[in-house]
């Protein structure tokens, strides 16, 4: 049995668009309260055997002179991610590093100026990538601080940093995210130090190596042994390894 195609009236097909256009033309956005949106950027690196986070000293009120996470208000013509990348670029002059959205912090009283919702991101930067750091136009200075010896912080930034550290520790157990804090090739001792610094505890060398070399992603090992070596102290040269993928991947086997 042959079905006859139903004819569409051109005037009817345009009707929804016409109605939406009229609705948008008469829409009054001022009828609703509009909170401000900011992005806060937690920037981690490993320096001098310590987990460091970049903080800026606020140049103006509120919390003038206190230390805070770099951040700023989102522009009307940029996405949240673009805003986070802008903040990262302004403070460290680096691009193309590991970055992910962390959490949204929206307590009504978190900012004394007005209702401000902050979307926090965190980035992992290998130490040699950052040549200089600089404070933005609204800050007095920028400085690396140990995550384990933080100064008093403005707003709810202590809560944000605590959340970021917890996320980073969890990700060490089920992803290959440590790659973002290491050069292209490294020794297993250097990799173990990264884990110990972030987890803030000593790890048994033999057990760590057994677990880390057993970690897999898509039925492939997470690490690949190279033919290169590196001198570590007075011992014999240590073998260098590399991550098979230098992008965030789910792995299994560390726990």
Image (spheres, rainbow, N blue to C red):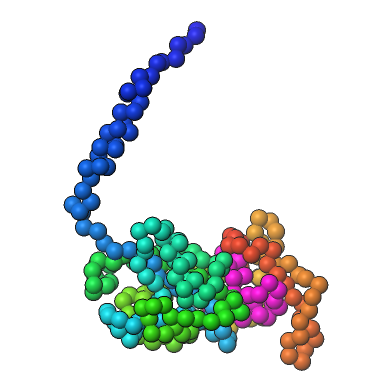
Q: Residue at x 35, y 19 (%)?
A: 9
Q: Position of residue 119 (x, y in %)?
A: 38, 64
Q: In the rendered image of this protein, does residue 72 appear above or below residue 60?
A: above
Q: In the rendered image of this protein, does residue 150 appear above or below residue 10?
A: below
Closest to the observer: 110 or 70? 70
**Residue 55 visible to the viewer:** no
Q: Residue at x 38, y 81 (%)?
A: 139
Closest to the observer: 27 or 109? 27
Which quarter shows the C terminus? bottom right
Q: Residue at x 23, y 51 (%)?
A: 29
The boundaries of the magenta stretch are 174-198
- Give the number of marks: 0
Outermost residue on the bottom side: it is 234
Horizontally, residue 41 falls left or right of residue 210, namely left
Rendered image quadrant of residue 112: bottom left
Horizontally, residue 114 falls left or right of residue 102, namely left
User: For the stretch drawn in magenta, what is the main secondary structure?
Assistant: helix
Q: Residue at x 78, y 71 (%)?
A: 226
**Residue 45 visible to the viewer:** yes
Q: Position of residue 218 (x, y in %)?
A: 66, 55
Outermost residue on the top side: it is 1
Q: In the rendered image of this protein, does residue 124 appear above or below residue 24?
A: below
Q: Position of residue 242 (x, y in %)?
A: 70, 70
Horizontally, residue 17 falls left or right of residue 44, namely left
Q: Position of residue 203 (x, y in %)?
A: 60, 80
Whether residue 179 appears in magenta in the rendering, the answer is: yes
Rendered image quadrant of residue 251: bottom right
Whether residue 160 appears in magenta in the rendering, the answer is: no
């Amino acid at each position: 049995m042959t079905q006859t195609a139903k004819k569409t009236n051109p005037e009817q097909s345009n009707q929804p668009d016409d109605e939406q256009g009229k609705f948008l033309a008469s829409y009054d956005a001022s009828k609703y309260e509009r909170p401000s949106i900011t992005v806060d950027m937690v920037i981690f690196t490993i320096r001098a055997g310590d987990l460091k986070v970049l903080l800026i000293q606020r140049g103006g009120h509120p919390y003038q002179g206190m230390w805070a996470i770099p951040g700023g208000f989102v522009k009307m013509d940029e996405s949240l991610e673009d805003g986070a990348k802008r903040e990262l670029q302004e403070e460290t002059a680096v691009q193309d590093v590991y970055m992910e959205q962390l959490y949204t912090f929206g307590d009504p009283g978190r900012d004394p100026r007005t209702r401000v919702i902050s979307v926090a991101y965190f980035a992992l930067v290998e130490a040699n990538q950052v040549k200089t750091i600089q404070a933005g136009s609204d800050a007095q200075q920028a400085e690396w601080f140990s995550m384990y010896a933080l100064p008093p912080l403005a707003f709810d930034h202590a809560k944000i940093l605590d959340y970021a550290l917890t996320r980073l520790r969890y990700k060490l157990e089920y992803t290959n995210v440590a790659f973002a804090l290491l050069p292209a090739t490294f020794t297993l001792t250097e990799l173990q130090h990264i884990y110990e610094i972030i987890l803030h505890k000593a790890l048994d060398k033999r057990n760590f190596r057994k677990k880390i070399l057993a970690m897999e992603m898509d039925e492939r090992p997470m690490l690949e042994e190279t033919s290169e070596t590196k001198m570590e102290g007075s011992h014999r040269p240590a073998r260098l390894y590399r991550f098979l993928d230098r992008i965030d991947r789910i792995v299994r086997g560390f726990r």
